[in-house]
Image (tube, rainbow, N blue to C red):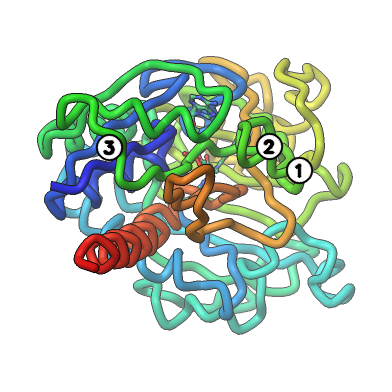
Amino acid sequence: MPNIVVLGAGVSGLTCALLLARKGNAVTVVAKHMPGDYDIEYTSPWAGANVLPMSLDKDSRWERRSWPELRRLAAEVPEAGLHVQTARVLRRQVDVSAGLKAIIADGLYQLSPWYKEVMDNFRELPAAELPPGIHSGCEFTSVCINTAVYLPWLQGQCARYGVRFRRAVLKHISEATAMSHHAGGKPADVVVNASGLLACRLGGVMDRTVTPARGQIVLVRNEAEGVMPTTSGCADGDEEIVYVMQRALGGGTVLGGTYMKGSWEPNPDPNMAMRIMRRAVETHPELTGGKGVEGLDIIRHGVGLRPLREGGVRIEKEEIEGTWVVHNYGHAGWGYQGSYGCAERVVELVDEILGTTKQASKL
Ligand code: FAD
């Protein structure tokens, strides 16, 4: 049985571990942070998270391939913590006039996006449904993931397929080779690197093109009534964004947010929090029944750091100090909505390596 060590227990590492274990590999997950932890170095628990396709058509494989599984989980596996919601995407007049160039999730706001063929019940909004200042918009069926439920569920699924878990902090990726819990300490045949933002500090990888895109949120008890609105920009500045999503299973409603490239600041900024809340009640007055910011019932403030990588996600194989490594990091703001597509590619690359290894040992 091939022996694989996955470095990382965020959504990327856990999804890879699950798919690899389901195929019959002996998998060990090694990580500094595990589901249940909240730490600024561990992005996954801070995500909303929902599915708002962000890629351009040419890079859409990861999101296209993930959607069927996320939709299935929402429909058939209530304990996974996903529920169906309607996404409402609004393109501001000012952003469309500027050619939709300066906005953060460029694929999401395209006038004729690739995902209109993929997401169920896609419709362009008629002019009568558009708020002032909005050029156009669309709606489609999506899901919202309660990450506080989903990550432990994913870990449980891994355990069901025999995945073992170890807490450790690695200085160098090659240390993972000796960390398998299977096969009596036999070295791993393949290491999967799902180290997220910390890929920029991990020996043997040290990817300096990985930087944080800081996301500040406010989690509230108010309900968003099944709709997840998001707007292509906001008047408060280029680093600020507007979105609302209600998590499944009583997980509260996430009000966002920010997208601050290069900022490692772990503490919520109170002024920013006020702007986030003001924008949320302006764009979504139903949240407080028209009572404004004072009608919000705050659970907590939060900050997470999206693992942004110049040039996009890195999913490829590389031999490092005699061990085959498959990288899967740099998912920025779409790690959940692309998780199954990326993990599927990781499995393909692992299979390629194991095929090669078998060939070589036959000679
Ligand atoms: P992480 O979750 O950071 O996991 C990395 C793992 O590697 C951890 O277990 C860590 O301990 C381990 N590790 C790293 N280095 C070492 C080491 N040296 N030794 C041992 N262990 C190590 N995505 C969506 O799809 N939809 C959304 O709506 C969405 N909203 C978001 C909102 C916010 C505010 C934020 C911050 C993010 C959002 N995202 C969203 C993005 C998503 O959260 C990330 O893309 C995703 O969580 C990245 O997961 P990861 O597993 O790659 O990294």
**Which residue position is annotated with label 1?**
208
User: Type of residue at label 1?
Assistant: Arg
Give the SS element for disc 1.
loop
Q: Position of residue 156 (x, y in %)?
A: 19, 30
At x 38%, y 34%, the residue is: 177
* Residue 192: quadrant of the picture: top left
Answer yes or no: disc 2 within 8 Å of ligand 1: no
**Which residue position is annotated with label 3?**
81
Image position of 105 with respect to 327: above or below: below
Q: Position of residue 97 (x, y in %)?
A: 87, 76
Q: Nearer the viewer, residue 316 or 60?
A: 316
Quadrant of the frame with the C terminus: bottom left
Are the two marked residues, 1 and 2, in contact with CB atoms closer than 8 angstroms? yes
User: Type of residue at label 2?
Assistant: Cys
**Which residue position is annotated with label 2?**
200
Query: Which tag, 3 or 2, sits closer to the chain's start?
Result: 3
Query: Which tag, 1 or 2, sits closer to the chain's start?
Result: 2
Image position of 34 with respect to 346: above or below: above
Give the distance between the C-alpha atoms of the residues marked 3 and 2, in whole angstroms: 31 Å
Give the SS element for disc 3.
loop
Question: Is 350 on the left or on the right of 98, as rendered?
Answer: left
Asked if residue 61 shows in the view, the reply is yes
Question: Is 153 on the left or on the right of 341, as rendered?
Answer: left
Question: Is 327 on the left or on the right of 56, as rendered?
Answer: left
User: Type of residue at label 3?
Assistant: Gly
Q: Nearer the viewer, residue 173 or 28?
A: 173
